[in-house]
Image: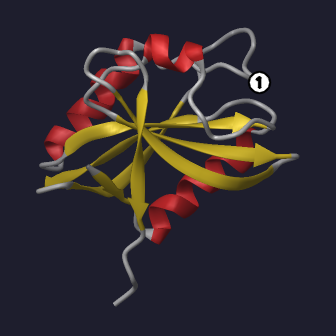
Amino acid sequence: MKLQLPPEAEAAIRAHAREEYPHECCGALLGREEEEVRVVEQVIRLANERTDERERRFYVSPQQVLMAERQARKAGLLLLGFYHSHPDQPPIPSAYDREHALPFYSYPIVSVKQGEPTELRSWRLREDRSGYEEEAILTPRAE
């Protein structure tokens, strides 16, 4: 599976990460699946509801997930996954990320170095939860 992330969606994720630094940001990805490609059509900012360790952890409540699922359904889309940032850390899932992830979803992570978003990589948790597989990110060309 690959993740198609239009430039405006990637820009929205990077802007959110920049604004929330030095805390982790998080959000939802809405879109559709086409054969082996997940196409992101909307990015929804979610609140990082952690009350501690916000520099290295995020929490999305079930209520926020339900809101994202409803918004996706209303638009005729799927909830494809959740993005978050890693302030001053590489965009690689942590053990904490794995404990709180679900196998179906895509998990793009953007690294934020001293306030500036840098590398962006996407991951899918294996069905057996043993680890992640990296998911290629496709950027469509402007028409």
The one nearer the camera, 8 or 64, is 8
Q: Is 89 displayed left or right of 94 in the figure?
A: right
Amino acid at circle 1: Glu
User: Dividing the picture into quarters, in which one does residue 86 lie?
Assistant: top right
Q: In x, y percent, where is residue 124?
A: 37, 34
Q: For the residue labelled by badge 1, is the local secondary structure a helix, a strand or a loop?
A: loop
Q: In x, y percent, where is residue 49?
A: 58, 17
Q: Is 11 displayed left or right of 30 in the figure?
A: right
Residue assigned mark 1: 55
Q: In x, y percent, where is residue 81?
A: 35, 37
User: Dividing the picture into quarters, in which one does residue 37 lie?
Assistant: bottom left
Q: How is the image coloured?
A: secondary structure
Q: In x, y percent, where is residue 10?
A: 51, 60
Residue at image position (63%, 38%) is 85
Q: Is 13 displayed left or right of 107 in the figure?
A: right
For residue 136, above or below residue 123: below
Residue at image position (57%, 63%) is 11
Question: For the C terminus, which image quadrant?
Answer: bottom left
Residue at image position (77%, 24%) is 55
- Mark 1 Cα shell of 10 Å, populated few (<14), some (14-19), many (≥20): some
Return the residue found at the far bottom: 143
Residue at image position (41%, 67%) is 6
